[in-house]
């Protein structure tokens, strides 16, 4: 409960800072609409020439894009403001030193204390596209499918957070290493169903860098119904990733001796 109160307080302060610069809101809305509109336009163009792509219908693609956009919005709101460019802000500029003096978990402070409320625009747009895709689907999701989708989306968010922490932890051993560009590029692959990739890439994006969990698996579960094995695998992946992130963070802190170390 203490961490939830800290998360709420941090979000409240970030929201007040954001609304103080109203012109940013206009540009963020325009950028969000442009990015999402481009993705949807590409899908609509493809489906003017085909009824399905890698076994996915247009409605299924829209649900996938909506799910991806929703998770991207939550990532941009709560995770990226803290972990993006962590080697620069946390290690070399000494922000982590201040977190170590606070009476709260340093992992929480370093990875979730800040937020970017304007990024929730992407979350809302994702909900809209998700509803559009569900309305266009031939079969309505079952209650079990909806619940399973929620569980897998939460699991995807945990895995997303854990990946961000693991990449940030590399800064304890290589402070000048910046992998954010690679991470953001790989993240873009999550907007496509894994079936469109060749098998080696599909295996890589499912078990090594689990982009399949971001949108493909939740979408398939929402429209196709719950599968116990998929749910167990998603929850296990989230728990394992979170535990690995926590272990890596503790190992990094044992090595850390101060800014520029």
Image (cartoon, helix red, strand yellow):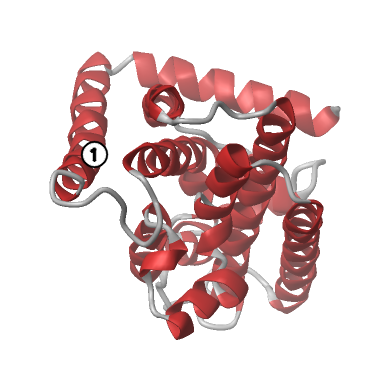
Foreground pick, 39 / 85:
39
- The structure residue drawn at horizontal position 25% and vertical position 24%, both measured from the top left corner, is 29
In the picture, measured across the screen, residue 6 lies left or right of residue 188, that is right
- The structure residue drawn at horizontal position 22% and vertical position 29%, both measured from the top left corner, is 33
Q: Which SS class for mark 1?
A: helix
Asked whether the viewer can see residue 191, the reply is yes
Which residue lies most toward the right here?
1
Residue 255 position in % (x across, y down): 72, 79
Q: In which quadrant of the rendered view does residue 30 lie?
A: top left
Identify residue for label 1: 40
- The structure residue drawn at horizontal position 79% and vertical position 47%, both measured from the top left corner, is 105
In the picture, measured across the screen, residue 187 lies left or right of residue 43, that is right
- The structure residue drawn at horizontal position 53% and vertical position 65%, both measured from the top left corner, is 91
Quadrant of the image for the C terminus?
bottom right
Q: In which quadrant of the rendered view does residue 40 lie?
A: top left
Q: How crowded is mark 1: few (under 14 residues within 10 Å), some or many (20 or more)?
A: some
Q: In which quadrant of the rendered view does residue 85 lie?
A: bottom left
Q: Is residue 47 above or below residue 193?
A: above
Residue 253 position in % (x across, y down): 73, 69
Quadrant of the image for the N terminus?
top right
Foreground pick, 174 / 187:
187
Foreground pick, 199 / 124:
199
Q: In this view, does 220 lie above or below 182?
A: above
Asked whether the viewer can see residue 261, the reply is no
């Amino acid at each position: 409960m203490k961490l939830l109160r800290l998360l709420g307080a941090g979000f409240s302060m970030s929201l007040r800072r954001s609304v103080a610069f109203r012109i940013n809101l206009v540009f963020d809305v325009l950028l969000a609409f442009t990015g999402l509109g481009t993705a949807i336009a590409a899908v609509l163009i493809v489906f003017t020439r085909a009824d399905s792509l890698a076994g996915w219908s247009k409605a299924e693609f829209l649900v996938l894009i909506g799910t991806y956009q929703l998770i991207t919005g939550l990532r941009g709101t709560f995770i990226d403001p803290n972990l993006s460019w962590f080697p620069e802000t946390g290690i070399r500029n000494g922000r982590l030193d201040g977190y170590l003096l606070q009476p709260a978990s340093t992992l929480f402070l370093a990875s979730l204390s800040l937020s970017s409320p304007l990024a929730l625009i992407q979350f809302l747009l994702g909900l809209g596209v998700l509803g559009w895709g569900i309305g266009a689907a031939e079969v309505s999701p079952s209650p079990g499918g909806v619940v399973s989708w929620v569980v897998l989306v939460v699991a995807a968010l945990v895995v997303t957070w854990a990946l961000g922490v693991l990449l940030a932890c590399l800064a304890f051993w290589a402070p000048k290493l910046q992998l954010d560009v690679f991470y953001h590029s790989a993240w873009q692959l999550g907007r496509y169903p894994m079936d469109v990739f060749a098998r080696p890439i599909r295996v890589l994006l499912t078990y090594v860098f689990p982009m399949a969990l971001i949108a493909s698996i939740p979408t398939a579960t929402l429209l196709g119904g719950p599968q116990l094995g998929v749910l167990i695998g998603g929850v296990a992946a989230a728990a394992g990733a979170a535990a690995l992130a926590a272990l890596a963070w503790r190992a990094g802190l044992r090595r850390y001796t101060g800014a520029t170390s």
